[in-house]
Image (cartoon, rainbow, N blue to C red):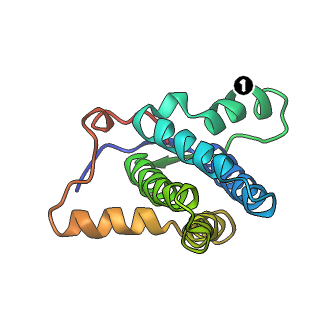
Amino acid sequence: MNTPATTVDYSALRVNQASIIILLALAFVLNQPWLAAFVAVVMWVGTFLPQAGLFKLVYQHGLKPLRIVRPAPKADDPRPHLFAQGVGALVLTISSIALFAGLPLLGWALAGVVAALAAVNLFLGFCMGCFIYYQLARRGIQANLPWWQTPQGA
């Protein structure tokens, strides 16, 4: 799958991952399923409207201008990162449904998987969702949304 490289700000990705981890940990500790559902919604918005993702906006309009976090642009295709975020949003949506349906063990376990994979990406630099995206592409499956064809950033 040859696509033109674009620039992805890895600091924006790290802020996104850290936000997911912190909010899901807080949701679990405080036993607040609505907070897990909120993170799922934020992730869906970031998947379908990449420039409107809340965590990205916090980075772009708060952390970056205040120089709390420095930009880390790299030539990269944003689509695998967007796909990964969508997979995380899907798992977190199922988690939220389980939590509201009275299945806390399943709900928090799924939320824990999302948080753990975000932590692996944040601390070890391995994106499981990106790996899945590339494995699907190797098998001829294009896991892209139509508006991702012109890279918009991750």
- Name the residue rendered at 40%, 36% in the picture: 48
Residue 68 in the figure: left or right of residue 103: right
Q: Amino acid at mark 1?
A: His
Name the quarter where the N terminus is drawn: bottom left
Return the residue found at the far left.
140
Between residue 32 and residue 15, name the one nearer to us.
32
Residue 59 in the figure: left or right of residue 5: right
Residue that numbered label 1 is attached to: 61
Residue 16 placed where, x, y %? Answer: 64, 47
Between residue 97 and residue 6, name the one nearer to us.
97
Residue 14 in the figure: left or right of residue 81: right
- Name the residue rendered at 72%, 53% in the picture: 32
Residue 130 placed where, x, y %? Answer: 42, 62
Classed neighbour count for the residue bearing mark 1: other residues with Cα under 10 Å, few (<14), some (14–19), many (≥20) = few
Residue 34 placed where, x, y %? Answer: 65, 46
- Name the residue rendered at 75%, 61% in the picture: 25
Is 53 rendered above or below residue 79?
above
Q: Quadrant of residue 55?
A: top right
- Name the residue rendered at 48%, 35% in the picture: 45
Q: Secondary structure at mark 1?
A: helix
